[in-house]
Image (tube, rainbow, N blue to C red):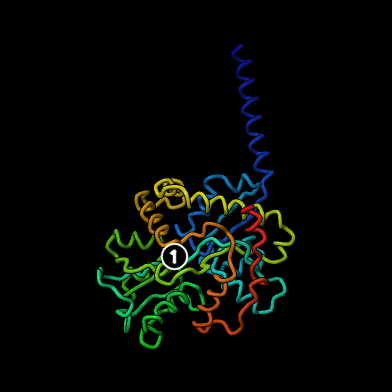
Amino acid sequence: MKRLIAIVTAALMLLVGLCACSEQESLKKITLSEVTHSVFYAPQYAAIALGYFEEEGLQVELVNGEGADKVMTSVISGQVDIGLAGPEASIYVYNEGKEDYAKVFAQLTACDGSFLVGREADSDFSYEKLKGTHVIAGRKGGVPYMTLEYLLGQHGVTPENTNLDNSIQFSMMGSSFASGVGDYVTLFEPTATEFELTGQGHILASIGEDSGEIPYTAYFANKSYMEENSDVISAFTRAIYKGQQYVANANAEDVANLIVDFFPDTDVSVLTKVVERYRDIGAWATDPVLEQDSFERLQDVMQSAGELDVRADYSEVVDTSFAKAAMS
């Protein structure tokens, strides 16, 4: 009898295992390259953690592209299927005249997600105080640098009277500041809050809150990939929309507990504070539609920075059909 029970138990375990394997094999595997790893992309991590991609038949491999230019290169070359970075990357590629360029299909964030960090606390901070200082500002031509330059210009701070350092790689900005380089730096979360908690710096301002709405990060894929895999793009966008809705409606602590596995070195209490901070500045888009007025504002910023000679046609660079369908 015991032997019979053991045989039946083993058979059941084998059956469960086979079912699990079968389910995994039925999922469409895709690779997603994100421009950096940040709580700024919480809706995406929520979608992964809550199984929204699996519900849509997708198995997502997430990789850190470490910069918009690298993400775009990996998408264009076919090394990854979908990229997450600033839409300016797609504008640049489109204006190069490539036939199979990367097209934007969903927006994730609605403003700049970086914070200005200084070496000393300043309760009376103003951007005018940056004149004549050394600011680690990010890669020239990228949205972080251009948004900062656009904002500072409104306060009379320009590359002519201030060292807006664009020589340091995005992934090295925090460590460079910590090692003594620069007077100020722009950092994403959770790095900005961690610097403050460890005494390595003090958050002085939110670049996103002060610069206003802009389509800061969005998803894109090669035009040919989107045409050949429209079902994948549709499923992906639906999962992202579910993640956006979850983050928009859940309390900050629940969101923090959900995404903590993506940030194993960050305490839940810190993540909760970061989620609250991003929510307060309206960092996350509540739906994936990248509207034309936001797209044109991005191009205004690019032109102001001297990085855009010819404006791109919104309808050529952005396809909102997948986002609108996901919401219907």
Q: In which quarter of the image is residue 222?
A: bottom right
Disc 1 crowd rating (10 Å Cα; few below 14, some 14-19, many 20+) is many
**Residue at the (31%, 72%) spot, across then down:** 180
Question: Residue pushed farthest bottom?
Answer: 160
Place of residue 88 in the rendered image (x, y in percent of width and height, measured from the top left): 56, 73
Using the image, determine if residue 13 lies above or below residue 181.
Answer: above
**Nearest the camera: 37 or 277?**
277
Q: Where is residue 13 in the image (x, y as percent from the top left)?
A: 61, 28
Q: Number of callouts in the render?
A: 1
Of helix, strand and loop, which one carries label 1?
loop
Residue drawn where x is 56% and y is 75% of the image: 296
Residue 172 percent coordinates (x, y): 42, 69
- 273 over 216 or under it: above or below: above
The residue at the point 63 percent across, 37 percent down is: 20
The spot of residue 30 in percent (x, y) is 64, 54
40 shown above or below 67: above
Residue placed furthest toward the right: 228
Q: Quadrant of residue 174?
A: bottom left
For disc 1, the marked residue is 113
Mark 1 is on which residue type? Answer: Gly
Q: Which of 318 and 30 is in front in this view?
A: 318
Between 204 and 15, the one lying in front of the other is 204
